[in-house]
Image: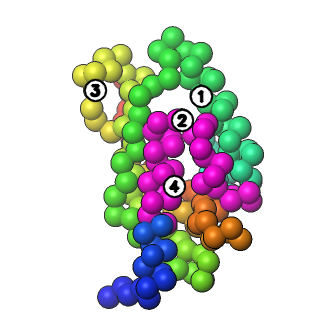
Amino acid sequence: MVTFDPDQAVSVIVIQQLVTEWAHELDVNNGIVGMAELLTEDVRYNVGGTVRGNRDEVLQFYKDRYARLEATEEGVPFHRHTLHNLRVAFTGADTAEIEFGLAYFTTAGVPAKQEHADPALLSDVFMDVRRDDDGHWRISRFDSTMTFHRVIK
């Protein structure tokens, strides 16, 4: 049985909200408006097949991605991240590991956008989080392993 002391229980809620804010930032703002506040400066962030070694590199990735998508004929696709089975394990007073499942829905590469509803991919996500000196929990590592993905014909 998993038990938390009262301080850890509060931190679990805050950490779960951090992950929800991360997904919301990607869904609503494509990672280009509020992502900086969610990441540590020294974050290790594996996205697009490359590990980004700090916050600025992650922010640049999302800015470049948005510009690339915006320049396509289809424009920026609609997408949503759905999180499930979120698990928090403390590794110290101010550090924790997170695991959760992610279902990613997107209209990218699909001609009939309103008619399309199946997920583009399912992934197992691994994050480390850290409480910074200002007391805020932030993502210090992001990685994922794709378990299923849609094949576009």
- Kindly check if marks 1 and 2 are in contact, taking CB atoms under 8 A apart as contact: yes
Residue depicted at x 53% and y 71%: 97
Residue in front for this viewpoint, 21 or 101: 21
CA–CA distance in space, label 2 to label 3: 20 Å
Residue depicted at x 47% and y 15%: 74
CA–CA distance in space, label 4 to label 3: 25 Å
Q: Which mark is residue 116?
A: 3
Nearer the camera: disc 3 or disc 1: 1
Residue depicted at x 33% and y 21%: 113
Sequence-first disc among 2 and 3? 2
Tell me where the magenta segment starts and ends, as one range: 15-43
Sequence-first disc among 4 and 3? 3
Nearer the camera: disc 1 or disc 4: 1
Residue in front for this viewpoint, 47 or 67: 67
Of the 4 image quadrants, the one containing the C terminus is top left
Does 89 sit left or right of 139 as displayed?
left
User: What amino acid is at disc 4?
Assistant: Ser
Whether residue 19 is visible, yes or no, is yes
Task: Look at the numbered disc 1 and give the secondary structure of its residue.
Answer: helix
User: What amino acid is at disc 1?
Assistant: Tyr
Mark 2 Cα within 10 Å, few/some/many (few <14, many 20+)?
A: many
CA–CA distance in space, label 3 to label 1: 22 Å
* Most common SS among magenta residues: helix
Sequence-first disc among 2 and 4? 2
Mark 3 Cα within 10 Å, few/some/many (few <14, many 20+)?
A: few
Mark 4 lies on residue: 144
